[in-house]
Amino acid sequence: MRDDETFQDKIWWSDEACFKLNGHINRHNCSYWSHDNPHVVLEKEVNIPGVVWAAMSSNGIIGPFLFDSSVTGQLYLDMLQTFFFPQVQHERDIRFQQDGAPTHYALCS
């Protein structure tokens, strides 16, 4: 990094998050700054998958890409090959950063 002042411009950071396609929010990461509201009704929906993926760098944002089902290693690889890589193919010497989710290192055929 000391020898390359543009190193940080070559990194694409990526991640995905789960959403419910019916508009309900998964509130496990939300913070509330007051006591319980007696008028709030939280409905719980199950088996309504939705995953959104995006990547960003100092050059911009790619995405969102919406998965309409649970993400498998093959679906993730297909998204990278058909959606992400074509958009960065003109860039030279990129670094792609992802977390350790199992789909990111799955063996695909």
Image (spheres, helix red, strand yellow):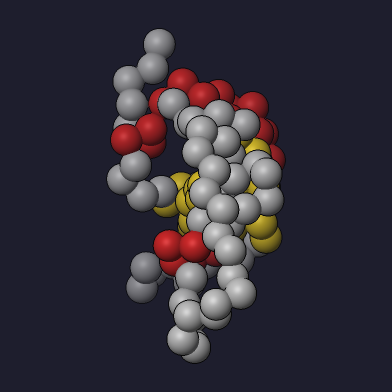
Residue at x 48% of width, y 70% of height = 30
Q: Residue at x 59, y 45 (%)?
A: 20
Q: How far from the left and from the top, in percent, is residue 2?
A: 36, 73
Split into 4 quadrants, where in the image is the C terminus?
top left
Residue farthest along the bottom direction in this orientation: 34
Q: Is residue 79 left or right of residue 104?
A: right
Instruction: Tell me where residue 74 appears, x and y as whole percent.
Output: 46, 21
Residue 15 to residue 88: above or below:
below
Q: Residue at x 62, y 31 (%)?
A: 68
How far across and down, in percent of the image, does residue 78 sit? 55, 24
Q: Residue furthest front?
A: 38
Can the viewer see residue 88 in this picture? Answer: no
Give coordinates of residue 100: x percent, y percent. 31, 45
- The answer to whether residue 103 is above or below residue 14 is above
Quarter of the figure with residue 108: top left
Give the tally of numbered discs: 0
Quadrant, the N terminus: bottom left
Asked whether the viewer can see residue 103, the reply is: yes
* Residue toward you, 109 or 96: 109
- Between 13 and 100, which is closer to the camera in this rendering? 100
Q: Nearer the viewer, residue 73 or 2?
A: 73
Image point 67% across, 60% down: which residue?
Answer: 60
